[in-house]
Amino acid sequence: MTSTHSPWRVALLEWRAQWRLGLAALIGTGVCFSVWPSVSSLFVAPLQEAFGWSRGEIALAHNASLAAAFVSPVLGRLIDRVGVRPVLLSGLLLTAMAYFLLAALRGPLPMYYLLYTVLCLVGATTTGLTFTRVVSGAFVGSRGLALAVTRSGLALSGALLPPMVFAIIATYGWRMGFVALGALVLLLALPVAWLWIRGASLAPVVADGGAHKPRSSLIGLLRNHKVLLICVASALNYAPIVALLSQFQPLLVSKGLGAAEAAALIGLVGVSALVGALLTGMLVDRIWAPLVACIFTLGPALGCLMLLPESIELYVAIVALILLGLGQGAEIDVVAFMIARYFGMRSYASIYGLSVFFIAAMVALGGSLIGLAYDYFGDYDIALLVAASCFVISAFSYLAMGRYPRIELAADDTAAVVASLRAEPST
């Protein structure tokens, strides 16, 4: 007599075989460049005091993140060609060096812009572009859960690192703040990546017989309507949330909440994002991922509509922010899962890099338009309606991905674990 092994049993065996790799991805995500947005504001006042630059001049450096987004598809292409390990290890070393160079900064302002751009470019190789490739290639039956666990490292560091870095800056100065960030990458992320992130699943996917199949160009990938669909869907999902986050406090105040009350509520988004990531990670391993993505994308649409009345109650704001946070947490993990599930690992990083590019372009556009919309209309209602429309379009775009294709998995340790599990006699 035979029976189907439970998903939990598959997950247990995968984690038993790959826990070191999963832990390395969690640590790396938590201490590498992805955490920089959470701590970057701590350096604004010290740099202003040290060099006399205005806050506007310092803020201009953030445009470098757009440059990183533009090169993400190219970096993804490189990862698919040479494998994730050499790109990741090189990126970790270079990211640490970039932090150390910023610590040694003596001015002038253009040099800060140059070093900040270098940090963004090399740091892009230590983000989801590489770490989701690591996890997606190593975990099969529990891929969604593994991606969610990896993302939880960023959520935890986003809560823990800012006060730690602030204390270091307050005690030892801003230079030591940059040194601390570089040391975390060099002394923590790099060693665990070197020791634990290894295996056949991280190498370029090759065809039968060992010969590489021709890979589609980036333009060729976009000609695949499903690749374009997932890039557009992810951008229409993520960008409105980021745009709204940039204006949440004044938006809530305009709806009748107190300034302090509104500021305190914003923390709900981060907590909800962590819950959304873990919840969707478990669901997509068992339920059709586009359906999960659709449900968690329609939630933020409802949240936007709840914020439309001229005056809202506190509980309405709480529910709306929770819905938005759940959607934000779900988006990145579900998209990474769907890229692996629909297109396999051969061009995974290239497609992920394309989605990053679409998201960054839409974030830049949305972040500007939401402020302009308020200036023109005198409130945020039009922006909320546009955001809700984007969420709805995104939700049904996910559904248009259709059923999962049959994709040959690359030979790796996890696949062997799952195969051995399936070969076990059942009672």
Image (tube, rainbow, N blue to C red):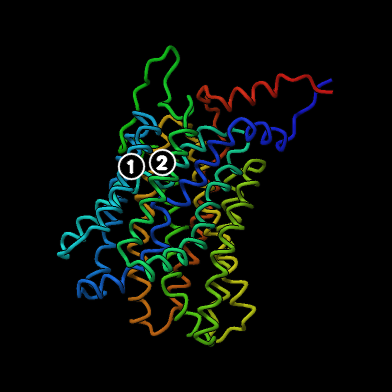
Marks 2 and 1: CB-CB under 8 Å? yes
Whole-number angstrom distance, CA of label 2 to CA of label 1: 7 Å
Q: Which of marks 2 and 1 is nearer the N terminus?
A: 1
Q: What element carries label 1?
A: helix
**What's the residue at 45%, 45% (across, down)?**
188
Q: Name the residue under label 2.
A: 190
Please name the amino acid that badge 1 sits on: Leu
Residue 72 visible in the displayed image: yes
Q: Residue at x 15, y 62 (%)?
A: 110
Residue 73 image offset from top left, x and y in percent? 32, 42
279 displayed left or right of 46? right
Query: How many badges with numbers are in the image?
Result: 2
Seen in the image, is 203 located left or right of residue 174? right
Q: Nearer the viewer, residue 61 or 332?
A: 61
Mark 1 residue crowding within 10 angstroms, few (<14) / some (14–19) / many (20+)? some
Give percent across and percent down for residue 325.
55, 64
| Image disc number at residue 346 | none
Q: Callout 2, which amino acid?
A: Leu
Residue beneath label 1, please?
93
Q: What element carries label 2?
A: helix
Q: Residue 296, position in %: x, y?
A: 59, 57
Q: Position of residue 227 (x, y in %)?
A: 42, 41
The relative height of residue 103 versus residue 346 in the rendered view (above or below) is below
